[in-house]
Amino acid sequence: MAEKKINYEKLEGINVVIVGHIDHGKTTLLERLSGKWASQHSEELKRGITIKLGYADAVIYEDKGEYNISGEGKSVKHVSFVDAPGHEMLMATMLSGAAMVDAAVLVIAANEGIKPQTREHLMALKAKGVKQLIVVQNKIDLVDKKEAEKNHNDILELLKKNYGTGEIPIIPVSAQQGVNISEVLKSIVNLSLIERKLDCDPVFIVARSFDVNKPGTEVEKLSGAVLGGTLKCGKLKVGDEIEIKPGRVVKEANKVRYETVKTKVVGLFLGSQKVSTLGPGGSAGIETELDMALGARDILSGNVVSLSGKLPDLSSEIKLKFELFEEIYGVGGHVAVDPIKASETLMLSINTETTGGNVKRLKGAELEMNLKVPAIVFKGDNVGIARNINSHWRLIGWGEVL
């Protein structure tokens, strides 16, 4: 069948993060949902785990009530998938993925049940304001009916306790065997889009940056640094003059300062497709005129992009209205979350940036912090709050920027 030509700029797009325990089959599921391995260009394949955020995009088609990614029927939705790490040491990376999305798919293996990381990821989604959720009960082919029903009931209780509702689709699946994938695609198609703001200056959050040039590329054919992430609001078009903050790290004597980077948009990508204009939603890329070395190895990850002169100044302080979880999981069982203390060091996840900070002022459910690395912050942003417990950064709550 000839590949269908699709206008990606007009097709409804949505960002979906795939989360769950390290061994519950997230990446295999993502291959079924997108036709791609999200970590295919990474050293992660050697180790069999996801270390950084993985990305894959797909167009979902509807054909006589069934859903597929093979091109049968009518195209109904463009989905950008983010594969978040399931490893407990990589919570900051997982939070970066959650900052970019409209919805989440939580993968729980029916033969292993609910793990501490399952609970922690559910809490992280709540912390980052992800309200739409689909639960995939994976590896259903490895259990009998009685085990499957028990696991299903355990998941319902988990959702009621940690997400405030049991009205969330739980879909039994075998990603390995390709069973019930159409139902997962259908649930994704039925997800609602977050309101897209177009009448504002563009805000693009950078989750990765890279050099796309192959070794041996002729000088005149070299491409500039590429920024990967998502546009939260506004529009960008090829030819726009843009700025990137915090930007370049400059070390002088014993001090560090941040220098705003300015450049021009020379190419835009929505998923793997080249477009001339970029709107909110979908995993996107910005090709720039910057030296390719500046984009290599995710150097610019955590930055924010807008039209030149439109971003606010860097903030070395932040004020939050916060809420703490009652308990956290996986630290020798369930552990109650102690109140935040004055002068305590915490880790904050602000959009795709992670930065430490000290509590400067604390009053009721509000706090002010000095940031170790300055950040671009916007009023109303969701911020994940983590504490160092037994040498591991553990998510303990969330805040809203005041």
Image: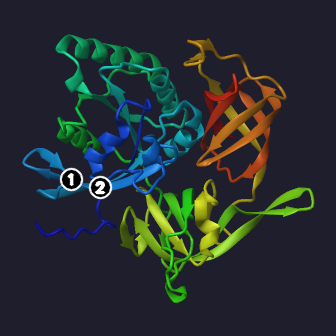
In the picture, measured across the screen, residue 47 lies left or right of residue 204, that is left
Mark 2 or mark 1, which has the lower sequence index?
2
Residue most toward the right? 253
Mark 2 lies on a secondary structure that is strand
- Whole-percent x, y for residue 57 in the image: 34, 55
Picture residue at 56% right of the left edge, 12% below the top: 333
Q: How is the image coloured?
A: rainbow
Q: Quadrant of residue 49?
A: top left
- Whole-percent x, y for residue 116 in the image: 49, 21
In the picture, measured across the screen, residue 241 lies left or right of residue 119, that is right
Look at the numbered discs 2 and 1 and tell me whether their residues touch, using CB distance below 8 Å.
yes
Mark 1 lies on a secondary structure that is loop
Q: Is residue 41 above or below residue 268?
A: above
Amino acid type assigned to the residue bearing label 1 in the image: Ile
Q: Is residue 125 above or below residue 308?
A: above
Residue with the mark numbered 1 = 69
Q: Is residue 3 above or below residue 156?
A: below
Picture residue at 49% right of the left edge, 81% below the top: 217
* Tag shown at residue 187: none
* Tag shown at residue 58: 2
Circle 1 packing at 10 Å, graded few (<14), some (14-19), many (20+), is some
Task: Name the residue nearer the viewer: 72 or 276.
Answer: 72
Residue most toward the bottom? 220
The quadrant of the picture occupied by the C terminus is top right
The quadrant of the picture occupied by the N terminus is bottom left
- Whole-percent x, y for residue 342 in the image: 83, 26
Residue 101 visible from this viewpoint: no
In the picture, measured across the screen, residue 318 lies left or right of residue 29, that is right
Q: Quadrant of residue 343?
A: top right
